[in-house]
Amino acid sequence: MKKKLFLLLTLAIPLVISAQTVALQPFASGFSRPIDIKHANDSRLFIVEQDGLIKILNADGTTNATPFLDIDARVNSSGNEQGLLGLAFDPDYATNNRFYVNYINNSGNTMIARFTTTSNPDIADATSEEILLTISQPYSNHNGGSIAFGTDGLLYIALGDGGSAGDPQNYAQNLQSLLGKIMRIDVSGATGYTIPATNPFVGNPAGLDEIWSYGLRNPWKMSFDSDNGELWIGDVGQSNREEINNVPIVNSGYNFGWKCYEGNATFDTTGCPAASSITFPVGEYNYGGSPFRCSITGGYRYRGSMYPNFQGWYIFADFCSNELGMLVPAAGNTWNLSLTSSGFSPNISTFGEDVNKELYAAGLNGEIYKIYDPTLSINENSLASKYAIFPNPAKAYFQINNQTNASQVQEVIVFSLSGRFISSTKITQEHQKISTNQLAKGIYIVQLISNNDTVSYHKLVKN
């Protein structure tokens, strides 16, 4: 039986989606300039701090006292876009303990390095570093920094155009430079890396073998859709457009247009290829305005189960306006883009996906947030059904009446009034008691799911 979870915000109006929006819920704090969030196929989140530390955030919101990795002495974080910028766990991490980082070293260059974990799964071996790539950076900004494994098992590395403004050396379109590119390499060997045979310029002197796509200004966060494997990129604009790119990875050689184009608008087309050869963004929004928007933080396409209204949305943010963005699928393979206030002022620097595909965001204020759906609400008069929960108010437990073989309640889910998931209980017998000992005093929403997918909602008061 397919379960669908509907999260609730208030008991004031009929069940309705009032607007397409997302919201932040504080989850953890005390971090220093968090800039990436990754998981290793378990319940832990790994929080990358710009100064050179990676810390483990547990599912209960606690943070391990000892960092997972500390390479602060090797990392140059003096520039606003420098530092330890990206983390990726090997697809075979459970057996080989290998992971990869992208950082700026003390000479100001991009380093792509491999590390291994010690016998303690919560502690990495900082002495195990193997440098795979060193890329010279002419300026301190536009370093990109994202790294991620695709469904093809290959490592993708996003680099900005080298910095300054307007790409003065035209690195993004220069196929003899790795700047302004996404590289793709095979790191499955014992040491070093090899070039995938399907990279577009293998055997072609026109471009470097590592290049997979090009024409990017400052790809500030890329991610892979955990459902279909497509790549999503948030590319920071110059002073006109912020853009979102989306492509399947079964193809390669994409030219995303910079500096010929900024989003869909022309920037400097001198010596540029025909527009028909450019892969234009699937979404864009204007720089400036009120609130002031200036820098996209790329996110993820939602593939979790807790918030069904989000399914298939690409969720991102603007770093300057502190707004959350939504790119929602529409008819004819088009997308609707909107931005809404996050209700916080975190300067959102990154998003992350946990092992259950639920989404998180981090702000340079040191806060980690969960993404949740605030738009569903319910009329208390509509809660009536053939089921009832009792006693209500409850102290230590509640039960469900009117159980029948034809329509047996199989699962009981408890949410807070803000829509936060609290607990799920499988019903295995009649008159089963559902404990409320873990609940603080207050009002909750209980969702009952029967074996024929019938769903009903009930208000629960905990005394």
Image: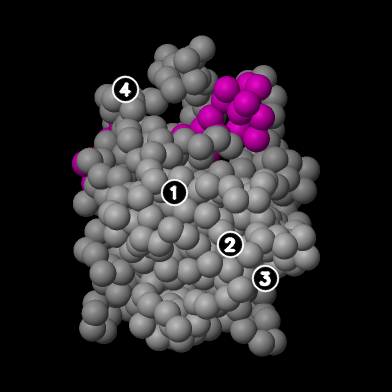
Residue under the image location 40 percent in, 62 percent down: 392
Q: Are marks 3 and 1 in contact (CB under 8 Å)?
A: no
Q: Is residue 240 above or below residue 463?
A: below
Quadrant containing the N terminus in the rendered view? bottom right
User: Marks 1 and 2: which is nearer the front?
Assistant: 2
Under tag 4, what secondary structure?
loop
Q: Which residue is mark 1?
A: 397
Residue 246 appears left or right of 8: right
Q: Earlier in the sequence, mark 3 or mark 4?
A: 4
Under tag 2, what secondary structure?
loop
Q: Which residue is mark 2?
A: 401
Query: Between residues 447 and 219, which one lies in front from this camera angle?
Result: 447
Mark 3 Cα-neighbour bin, 10 Å: few <14, some 14–19, many ≥20: few
Quadrant containing the C terminus in the rendered view? bottom left
* Mark-to-mark CA distance, 3 and 1: 23 Å
Residue 86 colored in magenta in the image: yes
Query: Between residues 162 and 415, which one lies in front from this camera angle?
Result: 415
Mark 2 Cα-neighbour bin, 10 Å: few <14, some 14–19, many ≥20: some
Q: Amino acid at mark 4?
A: Thr
Q: Which residue is mark 4?
A: 66
Mark yes or no: residue 430 visible: yes
Q: Are marks 3 and 4 in contact (CB under 8 Å)?
A: no
Mark 4 Cα-neighbour bin, 10 Å: few <14, some 14–19, many ≥20: few
Residue 400 appears left or right of 315: right
Q: Earlier in the sequence, mark 4 or mark 1?
A: 4
Query: Between residues 213 and 230, which one lies in front from this camera angle?
Result: 230
Q: Are marks 4 and 2 in contact (CB under 8 Å)?
A: no
Query: Between residues 297 and 83, which one lies in front from this camera angle?
Result: 297
* Mark-to-mark CA distance, 4 and 2: 49 Å
Q: Which residue is mark 3?
A: 454
Residue under the image location 60 percent in, 51 percent down: 431
* Mark-to-mark CA distance, 4 and 1: 38 Å
